[in-house]
Amino acid sequence: MEEIKSKNKTDDSRHYGEFGGQYIPETLVNELHRVSDAYNKYKDDPAFLKEFHDLLNNYANRPSLLYYARQMTEDLGGAKIYLKREDLNHTGAHKINNVLGQALIAKRMGKTRLIAETGAGQHGVATATIAALFNMDCEIFMGKKDTERQKLNVYRMQLLGAKVHTVTNGSMVLKDAVNAAMQEWTKRVDDTFYVLGSAVGPYPYPEMVHDFQSVISKESKQQILEAEGRLPDAIVACVGGGSNAIGSFAEYINDKNVQLIGCEAAGKGVDTDQTAATIERGSVGIFHGMKSLFLQNDDGQIDKVYSISAGLDYPGVGPEHARLAELKRAKYVGITDDEAVDAFEYIAKTEGIIAAIESCHALAYVMKLAPTMGKDKIIICTVSGRGDKDVASIAKYRGVNIDE
């Protein structure tokens, strides 16, 4: 099943301008209402927030470091560069922030089973981790291509007790994993909660992910004020569906002097058919329960997309990002595979950080941007995850086989 959508748009759907909403199968209408009700009940509940923040601080290892990249700054010769180190979180990425929030809601709803989609595997690992912590069953859906290029994370999920389903439909990448997870959810809603990993899908998911990931920008704002006494000039983050970016942008959206820059996966080039640069190349459509921007053909069928990054290999973008682009509040740029791999190697040699290939799309743009800015300017770039999972793939990209 290539698309999951219906004409149904429920009354409590939320929108970002024309984007967002709930376009869902009839079988999920009541369950989405229950998830919405639970989210709205608990998001401001003191007991819920206390447990959430306690787990963020004492289990997930927050606050994450805001690191001044001195050598990178000096080498590039322009703006000061700070890195928001989400790679230092437990499980190695920003994904755990959102998983903790959604899993706590699931627990309060009486659910005993978590399901999730994953591309690069970090969301799957985070979901499997919290399922183990909460003593819940866990099943993860992952495209066959992604299981092959992210073998380490597949084994990590299994080690944590999760069952990993290899999805062989469609292009066998992230969008197909989302399809499979949604289909599974329609079959078993009584005891199951779908932990959606990105800022996509039907309401309330984009809002939930925004809220739970906003801890990134809440911390970075406080940290940069302490370090520099003022706000940054630019925030840079990679964008697939857009979870780490919306978390990185959230607290700065109303600070008009702070430029927000999302870096999409251009693959072999924005002007080729081997790309995942949705905002630069996409058009308005409906897919995965939401109205947003998608890479699609003239008949509205979702195009195949490509990126070296399994986490950015997605044909759409979250509705809030689509709206920020429409309003020109945020700027979105495409970064090619070659540029991201160069950044992967650069940040390792310059700062001793092996960053996720997803994050390296953002770092690649910082490498272009910083030299064009004065030394009195400040950039914060979110390192959304660590790159252990990508080392074999990058080595292969460079013609070295380390799997044998």
Image (cartoon, rainbow, N blue to C red):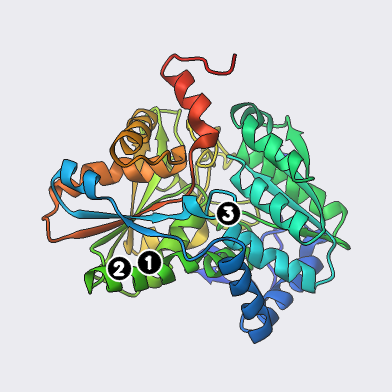
Numbered label attached to residue 220: 1
- Residue type at the position of mark 2: Ile
Q: Residues within 10 Å of mark 3 (few under 14, many from 20)?
A: some
Q: Is residue 142 left or right of residue 14?
A: right
> Disc 3 residue type?
His
Q: Is residue 79 above or below residue 109?
A: above
Q: Residue at x 49, y 68 (%)?
A: 215
Depicted 382 relative to depicted 140: above or below: below
N-terminal label among 3 and 2: 3
Can residue 202 be seen in the rendering of this structure? no
User: Type of residue at label 1?
Assistant: Ser
Find numbered disc 2 in the image and state the secondary structure of the residue it sits on. Answer: helix
Residue sitting at the far bottom: 46
Alpha carbon distance from label 3 to label 2:
23 Å
Q: Quadrant of the C terminus?
A: top right
Q: Quadrant of residue 304?
A: top right
Q: Position of residue 183 (x, y in %)?
A: 78, 48
- Labels 3 and 1: the sequence-earlier one: 3
Mark 1 crowdedness (10 Å alpha carbons): few <14, some 14-19, many ≥20? many
Q: Is residue 169 left or right of residue 348?
A: right
Where does residue 239 sit, x and y in percent of width and height?
A: 45, 49
* Residue under label 3: 90
As displayed, is residue 107 above or below residue 264?
below
Q: Dot 3: what SS? A: loop
Would you say the residues marked 1 and 2 are in contact, meaning their CB atoms lie under 8 Å apart?
yes
Q: To which residue does mark 2 refer?
A: 224
Q: Quadrant of the N terminus?
A: top right
Q: Residues under labels 3 and 1: Cα distance?
A: 18 Å
- Residue 376 shows in the view: yes
